Image: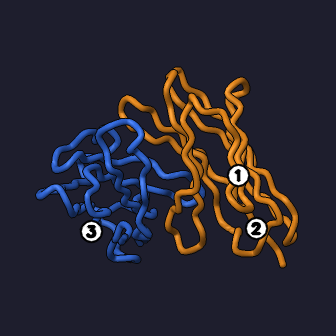
Amino acid sequence: AQKVTQAQTEISVVEKEDVTLDCVYETRDTTYYLFWYKQPPSGELVFLIRRNSFDEQNEISGRYSWNFQKSTSSFNFTITASQVVDSAVYFCALLRSNDYKLSFGAGTTVTVRA
Amino acid sequence: EAGVAQSPRYKIIEKRQSVAFWCNPISGHATLYWYQQILGQGPKLLIQFQNNGVVDDSQLPKDRFSAERLKGVDSTLKIQPAKLEDSAVYLCASSLGGLAGRDTQYFGPGTRLTVL
């Protein structure tokens, strides 16, 4: 079975602070894909990043960065210099490559206060 | 490029009534998914279509839920009769499908259903 755990339910920060969201996953597959999605109050899930299991390079995109550590089964997400527009629920998800089933964590609600 | 479209955005019904949701995927996407997202939880897959065929409906409560994608493009999800516990956001997603590496799912805005 595959499982995604986001231990942090809610995080509240002041604007310009950095915030790191934890994601730990479980899978027996050797090939899999990890994702982060953002769900703002409007409700739509917005795709942020996709990483496959063979690529452990960390990635930076603007104020967003991701740290993939296969040894600890973690795929953490950091927002640098947070802004009010970053307030949303963030979901980590795991996709199996054989049947393309996507399993989501419970999400972390990030609130950025001005 | 237009994203995944869903309608209606909001629906309020009484229990035992019927309701239908519509989804139009991104053009060219072969795979279409319906998810149910209960407040405070991550989305859970209800059904997955590849073109107009069902790939996985193991989590669909078939006694009351049905879905179709007759021409391999638009899809409709129906609940009949609705129960209080069906109150949730129903999300539609699509992906190119097929070969590995073309499986990022893109989501629509969702339909928020309230059953009274």
Residue A92's label in the rendered image is: none
Mark in the foreground, 1 or 2:
1
Q: Which residue is mark 3?
A: B22
Image quarter (top left, top right, bottom left or bottom right) of the C terminus of chain A: bottom right
Q: Are marks 1 and 3 in contact (CB under 8 Å)?
A: no
Disc 1, SS: strand
Chain ID, mark 1: A
Q: CA distance from mark 1 to mark 2?
A: 22 Å
**Residue drawn at point x = 64 percent, y = 56 percent:** A90
Residue A39, x across and y down, in percent: 57, 64
Q: Name the residue at the left extreme.
A: B71
Label located before the other in sequence (1 or 2):
1
**Residue drawn at point x = 40 percent, y = 44 percent:** B103
Packing grade of label 3 (10 A; few <14, some 14-19, many >=20) is some
Chain coloured blue: B
Disc 1 residue type (three-letter): Ile
Q: Which residue is mark 1?
A: A60
Q: CA distance from mark 2 to mark 3?
A: 32 Å
